[in-house]
Amino acid sequence: MSKCFRRKRDAHFQHFLGLSGLQQTIYLFSQMKSVPKKRLYPKKTKKEVSSRKVTIQYFVKVNGVDVKVCKQEFLAVHGLQKSKKRIQLLYEQISKGATTPKSDQRGKHQNRANKISDADRDNVKAHINSIPKYTSHYSRQKNPDKVYIDQDLSISALYHDYYLEWCEDKGLHAVKESYYRNVFCNEVNIGFKLPKTDTCKTCDFLNIQIKHALSKGELADTFKTELELHHYRAEELQTSLKEEIEKAKNTRDTLVLSFDLQQALPVPNLTVGPAFYLRKAWTYNLGIHDCIEDRGYMYMWPENVAKRGSDEIASILYKHFKKNCNDQYTKLIVYSDNCAGQNKNWTIVCLWQQLIRENFFKSIEDRFLVVGHTFKTSILS
C-alpha cells in the first residue's frame, strides 16, 4: 500500500468518523449499489440454486469519484470490521428494493418484556434504605454522606436472607439478584464496614463468655446483665455529654471540651522503595474540640521536639486555655478517654488546680468515657 493511498484512506476514515450516526448510515447506503447477479451456482443443500437475489457492489469516494472496492476493503476503510451487522442490515434493505435507509429504531420500540418497572426499582431501594446503617468515624471527611452496613453481611446475603422474605411478606414482585446488586452498587452510597479494630475488651470478654455458656447449654443471664450494664454506662456518658452541651449553650457560663491524641502519623508518607525500608519520623497530633462553639483545634509536633506523655498533654492544654479562653466561662467540663499515660494522671489534676488558681475557672469537672466506647457510632434508621 503506497503512502499516498494510505493518507487518502486515513483522511476518508477521519471524515467518516466525524459524521453523525444518521449521516454515516445515509452515506454507507449511498455507496452500496444493487445489481442483478450474473450467474447461478448450484448449492450442496436441498435447494437447487442460491437464494441470493442480487449482488451488492461497494464503492468509496476518492477525489469525488466512486471507486469500486471489495466488501472487506469497504469495511476496513470505514473502520467497520467489528460492525458487520450494520452493513448486513443495509444489505437486506437494498435487496428488498429500499431507496432510502430506515431510521434508527433503537430505544423506540415498546417490546420490552423483561424491563424492570419503576415500582420494582423503588421497592429495591426501599428495602436497602430499611437496613440499619452506620456513619464512619474515620471516613467522614473524605465521604461525609456515605454510610455503612455491618461487616457480617453481603449483597448476596441481603438478597437471599432478607429481600426475598421482605417481598413475600409485603406481596411484592422480587427482582433478580443481578438487578438488586446493580442498584446497591450504583444507586446508593452504602458500603460494608471493615472488621472492627481497637474494640472494647470488656464487650469482647462478655460476648465470648455468653457464647461459651450457650454452647454448653448453660445459663448466660449473669454475663448478659453485666454486658447490658456496661453498655448502659457507656451510653449514659455519651448522653451526659450531649445534655451538658445543650445546657451550656443556654447558660453560656460553662465551657465543654473534649480532647484526644490522634494515632501517630509517619513522616514522610512516601511509597518509593528506599523510603519504605527507612524508619519514619513520628508526628503527634492532639485534637481539642470546643463543644460549645463547635470548633476544633489541632496541635502537632514531631517526636524529635517532644514525646506524648502527660507533661506534653498538660503543656498543650495550658497553652490552649491561655490563648483561647475568655472570662465569660466560670466552669469547665472536660471529656477524654482513660489513657493513664496522657489524660488520667496527677499531672492533669495539677493542671486543673493551676487553672483554678489563676482564675481561669471556678470549678473543673474531668469526666472519662468508658474504655472502648470513647466514640459512639450513630445508627441511621
Image (cartoon, helix red, strand yellow):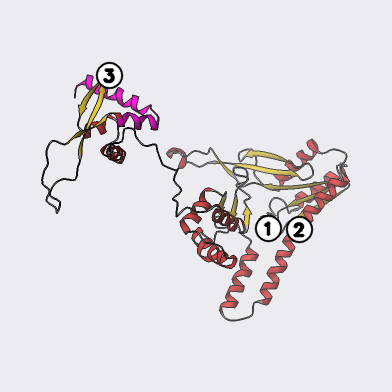
| Relative image position of residue 323 (x, y in whole percent) | 78, 35
* Residue located 50% across and 54% down the image: 116
Whichever of callouts 1 and 2 sits on the residue coming sooner in the sequence is: 2
Q: In the rendered view, does 297 fall on the left or right side of 165?
A: right
Whichever of callouts 3 and 2 sits on the residue coming sooner in the sequence is: 3
| Residue contact between numbered discs 1 and 2, judged by CB atoms under 8 Å | yes
Q: Which residues are magenta?
A: 1-29
> Residue tagged by mark 2?
237
Circle on res. 64: 3
Name the one closer to the observer, 166 or 214. Answer: 166
Is 207 above or below relative to 104?
below
| Residue contact between numbered discs 3 and 2, judged by CB atoms under 8 Å | no
Amino acid type, label 2: Leu
| Relative image position of residue 133 (x, y in whole percent) | 62, 56
How far apart are labels 1 and 2 at the CA level? 10 Å
Q: Looking at the rendering, which quadrant does residue 130 occupy? A: bottom right
How far apart are labels 3 and 2 at the CA level? 86 Å
> Residue tagged by mark 1?
373
| Residue contact between numbered discs 3 and 1, judged by CB atoms under 8 Å | no
